[in-house]
Amino acid sequence: MINKLVDKIKKLNSPILVGLDPMLSYVPSHIQKKAFDVYGETLEGAAEAIWQFNKAIIDACYDLIPAVKPQIAMYEQFGIPGLEAFKKTVDYCKEKDLIVIGDVKRGDIGSTSAAYATGHLGRVIIGNKSYSGFNEDFITVNPYFGTDGIKPFLDVCKEEKKGIFILVKTSNPSSGEFQDRMINSKPLYEIVGEKVAAWGDELMGSCGYSYVGAVVGATYPEMGNILRHTMPKTFILVPGYGAQGGKGADLVHYFNQDGLGAIVSSSRGIIAAYKNAVYTEKFDEESFADASRQAVLDMKKDIMEALED
């Protein structure tokens, strides 16, 4: 799947990832009303609203981007109906030939880790048949358990030709409480990065990048530069663009000299663009999806201009 991701980024000239993280407050009132008219102000109604919201944004942006990243917590908060909306979103994105990175941040050991990997990336055997659960192409994984936690994911990725993005240096302000701790004169995030590179050597795509990627936040560009050199064959998923403060000029060192090696994520900066003062003059609630499309175009321009400088 890493080969397809690289091919789509090249074809579209767009290392952009849309985070489908729909808080109900982001969903325009007319979509909420339509859903609640059918299902009432219930979990089912909320799930229907976020599904219709997602679908409109996907329809508006799918030709501009290679991939999406739905954050499962935003769906889990609505219980089983929310998870059904998550699955609908994954399936619809695949119909549009988008690569789906499930932002699930799973991590455990043994059979539990294997079950997570099977549920999100692999196939579960029931009798004489096999079934894909959520069926994402990549998922995010927490490395805190070490190799015991990662190997079950690697096994499924090898079998299914899918991938993972491992948390290395996250974009949140308190990430340094653990990730920046010095161990034998190296910060922990760099040690994790070295391990990610080693795990990735087992699963290399023909594109020159590994099926094992890394999550490195846009809010720490100096550390991104260090980690780019630590993990030269690792694709980096970069959250933190836009609403969290990251901008195109911060991201140059996350990419390799070939202009590849990273994909940059923006969530509310795109899906809730119609609420942003930059877009409110031109777009109203009814045209929220058009605002999202414009936000993608603006993000692409910002990043590509920075890479060309």
Image: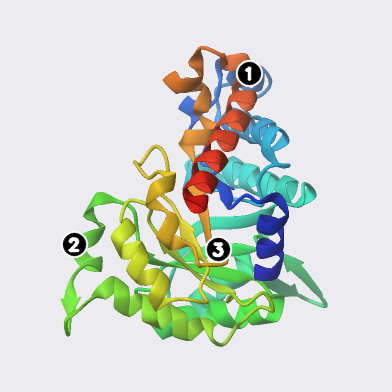
For the residues labelled 2 and 3, say whether their Cβ atoms are less than 8 Å apart.
no
Mark 1 falls on what kind of element? helix
- Residue 186 is situated, as x and y percent measured from the top left of the image, at 21, 79
Residue in the picture at 66% in, 78% down: 205
As displayed, is residue 267 above or below residue 274? Answer: below
Where is residue 56, by image quadrant? Answer: top right
Look at label 2 and name its amino acid: Glu
Mark 3 → mark 1, Cα distance in angstroms: 31 Å
- Horizontally, is 85 left or right of 235 in the view? right
- Residue identified by numbered label 1: 287
Instruction: Give the mark, 2 or 1, whose residue is nearer the N terminus.
Output: 2
* Residue 145 shows in the view: no
Where is residue 178, by image quadrant? Answer: bottom left
- Horizontally, is 134 left or right of 128 in the view? left
Mark 2 falls on what kind of element? helix
- How packed is label 2: few (under 14 Cα within 10 Å), some, or many (20 or more)? few
Name the outermost residue toward the right. Answer: 128
* Residue 296 shows in the view: yes
Residue in the picture at 59% in, 47% down: 83
- Residue 79 is situated, as x and y percent measured from the top left of the image, at 53, 43
Residue sitting nearer the eye, 258 or 284: 258
Mark 2 → mark 3, Cα distance in angstroms: 24 Å
Q: Locate the N terminus and report the quarter of the image it occupies.
A: bottom right
Residue in the picture at 59% in, 22% down: 288
Residue sitting nearer the eye, 281 or 90: 281
- Say which mark, if any, is on residue 177: 2
Residue in the picture at 79% in, 76% down: 127
- Say which mark, if any, is on residue 139: 3
Instruction: Give the mark, 2 or 3, whose residue is nearer the N terminus.
Output: 3
- Residue 91 is situated, as x and y percent measured from the top left of the image, at 73, 50
Disc nearest the viewer among 3 and 1? 1
- How packed is label 3: few (under 14 Cα within 10 Å), some, or many (20 or more)? many
